[in-house]
Image (cartoon, rainbow, N blue to C red):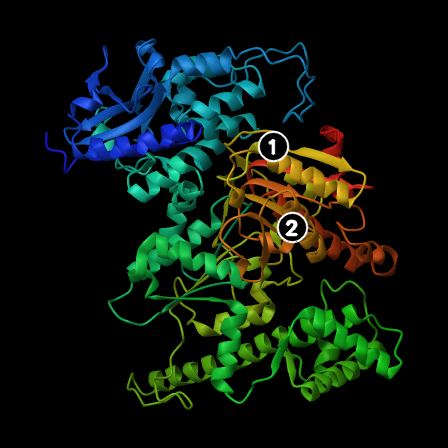
Amino acid sequence: MTGKNVTLRLLDKADREILKLPRPVKGAIYDFQHKFKTNPDSAGLRLKQLQGHDKLYSARINDEYRALLLRLADDDWLIVSVKHRKDVYAHLDRLTYSVNRVTGGIEYVDLQVVQEEVLSPPAPQTATPSLPTEPLHPVEPAAAQPLFEKWSEQQLTDLGVAPSLIPVVAALTTEDQLLGLVEYAPQLTGEVLLALYDGKEYDDVLEQVTAPVAAPEPVDTEDFRAAVERPATIVTTTDDALREALEGEDFGRWKVFLHPTQAKLVTRDYSGPARVGGGPGTGKTIVALHRVKHLVEQLPAGRTKPVLLTTYNKNLAADLRSRLLALGGEPLLSRVEISHVDQLALRTVREAEPGNRKRIIDEAQAVREWRSLLDELGEDGWDAEFLNDEWTQVILGQAVTSRTDYFRARRAGRGRTVSRAERAEIWQLAERFTQRLDRLEVQTWDQIAERAAQLETERARRIQAIDRQREEAGGLDNIHMADGSGGWLRYRYRHIVVDEAQDLRPAHWKMLRAMTAPDRNDLFLVGDTHQRIYKNQVTLGSLGINIRGRSSKLSLSYRTTRQILRSALNVLGEETYDDLDGSTETLAGYRSVLSGAVPDLHRLNDWEDEREAIAALIESWGDVPHEQIAIAVPTNQMASEAANTLAQHGIRALEIGPDGPRGDSGVHIGTMFRFKGLEYQRMIIAGVTDGLVPRASVQQRRTTDPARYRTEMQRARSLLFVAATRARDSLDVFWHGEPSPFLEELIKVRPPVAA
């Protein structure tokens, strides 16, 4: 057998198994795969067929470890497991592999490991009492009923449960056993069992979990070579992907993996704007990136960039660029414009108004200018933040240009009602405020977005007028040039894909709507309103973006464990969230197949004690790469103080600024706002103290402005929810003094760890 054309793949479950091995063994595996691809018959590899198996072989990785491989064809091999040599030959009859008749994917199960780790786990240590954990369902102490006795063997098989695991499933009686099985079971088996356990009806599981991943053609369960090419067989093949899997230093596998449910959303032909929602870690951004790739693949050859990929801030835009580059390389990137939406608006305004070089101020600076204006006028009856919100969300947000129009403007969701006389006062103050900004030669991002929306809307009107003239002339063209451009007047983009859609302003949506022709596959939006951390609430239908009938929801988290997910959902409480189109959205059915430790809660005496405890905790984690550890805090000052404390302990820290982490290696520290779109193995949220989360100023509005109080409390909950769901393996929450009211439910079921 020649080695140059040998294909060696790594099965998904083996990938996860390898992550738990010592670092030297991972290095040996990386060397092994190179040697195997060069010459699998090399004497040093000791490749041999295992007794009683026609497709399963073992090969030497080093003196202690062996790879178990399926031989798919003469030159095609699949690593299904890595074991210590003493464990390879002990229970050969308990190693099972098959092609799932529903999905057509390859599934490997070690029944001996399942028996030992799931049904007969070792007795827990009793020296230290274990802390209580929150059960998913209340369980009566005397109840030992099988969890899945309601469903027959045939039903479970029809749903896609691996046949070799049916006897094990029948023996499950506790949630811990179920979660243990999910760790070792093929992916579809885990998803089906968790969906049934979480209360979904059989027909719903069949439709929502099984059907999306079912193979489109009849499955030949003996054809392993065909099975490995199906989407249901999740494998790693490239050297870079294998290195990431072995080192565990990046979440590369789930960042690029496209579940068949997601793939259908990516390739669907939509009759107009479409939206994909879903909780944190469900792969919305992955769907957006693959959607961009799919749209580019449908384009005719060319050098233009007719696809726009945009999001709310610079951090996320930079991340999208690097991930799109990893997905499709320079050829893909060369056809896509990637820009955060404010930068896009600024470029649009400066193209049309090259003389406009006003300095840009942020929202905090704008509020300070409002306060200065009120002080100068001796006005003490208005709140500067209220006036700034009214100006940005109502006056600018609805492109109100006259006092009369403001009297008619909708104020839904603004909370406090204002009389006609008060509107007259607000309008006069708003005029003075804009004059003040002009005098100072400054402008806000809201003003830029609104001006860009006006410019693009007018451009779209001119294009539509030309189209009407063409129709009236029987399809004959007249030459119409864009003002000052010397080029044909046309829409800027053919397709627009928006990530983190819940955070865009109304003006952003008006601008984007005008930048592409209303047509098939024009706008594709992904986002989750439970993660809205800014004030920008919109109803897309009122802005000319109709997504009715073209909305989908992802419900399976690939990043966050069930334990962390459960705690994060408790933070949201009973709040209701909109769906960007005037209706409500829920995270019902949001679930994870990952399992891990319950988050730890830490109560300290003061902020200094918190910082010292955090440093000690990080030191206790040993070899965890520091760039996979993050600390989220309420304020910039607390971020700096935490970084200083870590430095005193010899732990390097990188503060996250507007452009991302300021360096290459070290623990990431920043305010909760900075962690949108990021993820880490270990997440610490500190300073979750009443008065900081939410801020005391929010609580003060409880009686003075109840509607605004509810909105601000919802945003504060969302911010904590976003921070908590950045974690993959562990979550630790710290506070001093009185805990945030958002932690009330967590503390009931998970007492704080002793300081």
| x and y, in percent, of residue 196 in the image | 52, 27
Q: Residues within 10 Å of mark 2 (few under 14, many from 20)?
A: many
In the image, is 426 to the left or to the right of 612? right
Please state, as top left, top right, bottom left or bottom right, where the N terminus lies in the image: top left
Q: Quadrant of residue 493?
A: bottom left
Identify the disc placed on residue 643: 2
Amino acid bearing label 1:
Ser
Where 100 falls versus 53 (above or below)? below
Seen at 51% across and 58% down, the residue is 316
Residue at the spot 31% in from the left edge and 61% down from the top edge: 330
Disc marking residue 197: none
Please indicate, yes or no, whether residue 209 appears anywhere in the rendered image: yes
Q: Classify mark 1: helix, strand or loop.
A: helix
Q: Is residue 535 above or below residue 37?
A: below
Give the residue displayed 47% in from the left and 46% down from the top: 283
Q: Position of residue 703 (x, y in %)?
A: 88, 56
Q: Amino acid at mark 2?
A: Ala
Q: Is residue 687 above or below residue 211?
A: below
Q: Which residue is mark 1?
A: 620
Residue ranking furthest to the left? 1
Quadrant of the rendering where the C terminus is positioned:
top right
Of residue 676 and residue 701, the one placed in the foreground of this image is 676
